[in-house]
Image (cartoon, grey):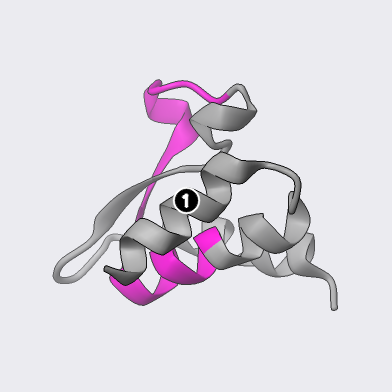
Amino acid sequence: MNYKRIYKNIISRGLNRIPDGYVEKHHIIPKCLGGSDEKTNLVALYPEEHFLCHVLLVKMYPEEKNLIIAVQKMCQ
């Protein structure tokens, strides 16, 4: 399965729409992978998309412990 392609599609969809309802801020490039808090690195995602993106990031970068911790926190 192409996790990176799925991730990019979700991010692209988030960047190219006007959100309707509750959204969560997501770092496109996670801070633990060198991403910043700049506006260009943030996207508004619906909660289900946000969670899925974090799961995909764990699949893409399984060695990065902070990504695993982020998913665990989202499950609590």
Residue 50, given in percent of the width and then of the height, sits at 41, 63
Q: Nearer the viewer, residue 54 or 66?
A: 66
Magenta residues (range)? 35-54
Q: Residue furthest right?
A: 1
4 lies left or right of 35 = right
Q: Nearer the viewer, residue 1 or 39?
A: 1
16 w.r.t. 75: above or below: above
Q: Nearer the viewer, residue 41 or 13?
A: 41
At label 1, which amino acid type do we have?
Ile
Q: Is residue 61 visible?
A: yes
Which residue is at a point 55% across and 54% down the rendered structure image? 68
* Quarter of the image that includes the N terminus: bottom right
Residue 55, given in percent of the width and then of the height, sits at 57, 66
Residue 41, given in percent of the width and then of the height, sits at 48, 32
Residue 20 figure quarter: bottom left
Q: Is residue 17 visible?
A: no
Which residue is at a point 42% across and 62% down the rendered structure image? 72
For label 1, count other residues whose C-alpha is less than 10 Å away and answer few (under 14), some (14-19) or many (20+).
few
The residue wearing badge 1 is 69
17 lies left or right of 11 = left
Q: Nearer the viewer, residue 64 or 47?
A: 64
Taking the magenta stretch, the answer to whether it contains residue 47 is: yes
Residue 46, given in percent of the width and then of the height, sits at 31, 68
30 lies left or right of 57 = left
Which residue is at a point 34% across and 70% down the rendered structure image? 75
Which residue is at a point 67% across and 42% down the rendered structure image? 64
* Quarter of the image that includes the C terminus: bottom left
- Indicate the secondary structure of the residue bearing disc 1: helix
41 lies left or right of 60 = left
